[in-house]
Amino acid sequence: MKFNLYSLELGQAIRLAKIEASSCPISIIHALKLFEEKLIQIILKEQNNKIGFYKLGNAIRFKLSDPFVEYDNKNILIKATENRRSLHKLFLSWVGLSFDKEIYLFVYGNAIGKKIVDSSTINVASINETAAEYVKYFNIKKATRFYIIEMLEFSNCAIEKVPLETGSRIYYKLIRHE
């Protein structure tokens, strides 16, 4: 999976910075590879014997029913791919809590998110906006740092638009390059 990695620090102010993806821990990389393979299998199954797929948000949400939280001695990985309401719930659960672990939030990049689910999916900008709201309205006493993993594209796969006139719906197809 190709991805961007960001650091988001909350305290008296917020600071979002893009950092080197190579600094992502191996345990998180391993969890991302497992998630990517599950996601590919769901998409391939959904598009099987069809022209392609259209908005797989529910299929992904229900077929990846495990909370997708990977724990190891130092890191927590959270799938944050739903909508803004779930993002607020996530912040209420995690912001300000004291952990001795690093928190990694997984989101879709804008381009891939619009193809797989829809434009209301959580992205880096919406996390930054929500963080700004929490800093503004809540007194965050302890500085908190999150990392955001923004999925840009699949490794060895591409999502291509299906060249078909279907009215307002746009269909896509996942193509494996092996």
Image (cartoon, rainbow, N blue to C red):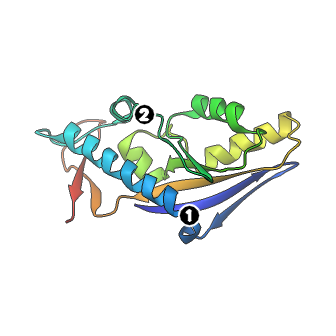
Q: Is residue 115 left or right of residue 104?
A: left
Percent coordinates x, y for residue 172 in the rendering: 26, 47
Q: Amino acid at mark 1?
A: Cys
- Quadrant assignment, res 139: top right
Q: Amino acid at mark 2?
A: Asp
Percent coordinates x, y for residue 125 in the rendering: 62, 49
Q: Is residue 171 visible?
A: no
Picture layout, residue 83 above or below residue 29 = above
Picture layout, residue 171 above or below residue 16 = above
* Residue under numbered circle 2: 66
The label shown at residue 24 is 1
CB-based contact (under 8 Å), mark 1 and mark 2: no
Picture layout, residue 67 above or below residue 10 = above
Query: For the view shown, which residue lies furthest in the left direction?
Result: 49
At 32% from the left and 45% from the top, the residue drawn is: 38
Quadrant (top left, top right, bottom left, bottom right) of the C terminus? bottom left
Q: Relative to the observer, which residue lies in front, 87 or 93?
A: 93
Q: Relative to the observer, which residue lies in front, 31 or 174?
A: 31
Quadrant (top left, top right, bottom left, bottom right) of the N terminus? bottom left
At 84% from the left and 39% from the top, the residue drawn is: 136
Q: Give the Cα separation between the discs numbered 1 and 2.
A: 22 Å
